Amino acid sequence: MASGDHLRYVALGDSMTEGVGDGDDTAGLRGWADRLAEHLAAANPGVRYANLAVRGRLAGQVRAEQLAPALALRPDLVTVVAGLNDLLRPRFDPVEVAGHLEAMFASLTGAGAHVVTLTFPDVGRIAPLARPLAPRVADLNARVRAAAARHGVTVADTGGQAVSTDPRLWAADRLHAGPLGHERIAAAVARAIRLPGSDDAWTHPLPPQDPPPAWRAAAAELRWAAAFLGPWIGRRIRGRSSGDGRRAKRPELLAVTPGSPR
């Protein structure tokens, strides 16, 4: 399918696709999927876009809650990004997570959609306390690539680029991309589906930056742990999720209005 034929775009996923880190819940979230929809609309103003993603969702929940509504919208382009929340859980099962992703790939491609997914960056290079998770990230990425190959799914290899772990692409919580990170992800997907005007500029490194003194870096780690890691662990202990009570921000296919959060 040519990029100009993408007229019905549906995004499935968790907080990353919902747009957390790019805007806020008061003014609205933008995020890479919104930004990609704007790229699509620039190529073809007839594009309509729905975003079914909800923060905190595990891969199995994305499959259970979002796949059927996505199929009902009869999309010709779908992005499926899930698994990072699973990866952060103590009982992470890469076979189970990859199975949910592959089931979504099979259903959506079987319905005639062009499906796109992403790879994940090494979270340990973004948050040093997460370094033990590096083997999990590599394993999940390998499984995503293999499942994608079996179903003709396009992979935007965002996790395979060194720039993906530059702190300047990430929000203060280090769990979500910031505006520049969301911009780069959207550009990566646009390039992967060969949208007119797309290129590999998203892979280019940012200008060099002197590292902070060791004492300042250590202080930043303590502040991050207190402000973000502690509350995250607290939610896990209580069995709570950041997505409790939330619904998809854009459940219907709507015309795209460039430049503003949704």
Image (spheres, rainbow, N blue to C red):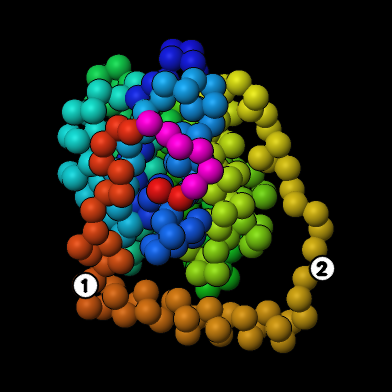
Return the residue nearer the eye: 85 or 16: 16
Q: Amino acid at mark 2?
A: Asp
Q: Which residues are magenta?
A: 255-260
Q: Magenta segment: does it hold 256?
A: yes
Dot 1, crowdedness within 10 Å: few (<14), some or many (≥20)? Answer: few
Instruction: Tell me the CA gap for discs 1 and 2.
Output: 40 Å
Q: Amino acid at mark 1?
A: Gly
The correct choice, above or below, for 14 with respect to 229 in the image is above
Is residue 17 shown left or right of residue 166?
left
Is residue 96 shown left or right of residue 159?
left
Q: Position of residue 99 (x, y in %)?
A: 27, 40
Tell me the SS state at disc 1: loop
Q: Is residue 163 visible?
A: yes
Q: Main secondary structure of the magenta part?
A: loop
Asked if marks 1 and 2 touch (Cβ < 8 Å), the reply is: no
Return the residue nearer the eye: 138 or 247: 247
Residue position marked by numbered label 2 in the rendering: 210
Residue position marked by numbered label 1 in the rendering: 239
Q: Position of residue 131 (x, y in %)?
A: 54, 66
Dot 2, crowdedness within 10 Å: few (<14), some or many (≥20)? Answer: few
Q: Position of residue 64 (x, y in %)?
A: 17, 44
Residue at 65%, 24% (x, y): give it.
197
Return the residue nearer the eye: 133 or 86: 86
Q: Position of residue 162 (x, y in %)?
A: 67, 49
Residue at 49%, 16% (x, y): give it.
4
Q: Magenta segment: does it hold 13?
A: no
Tell me the SS state at disc 2: loop
Which quarter of the rendered picture does the N terminus lie within?
top left
Residue at 55%, 69% (x, y): give it.
172
Return the residue nearer the eye: 204 or 35: 35
Q: Is residue 146 visible?
A: no
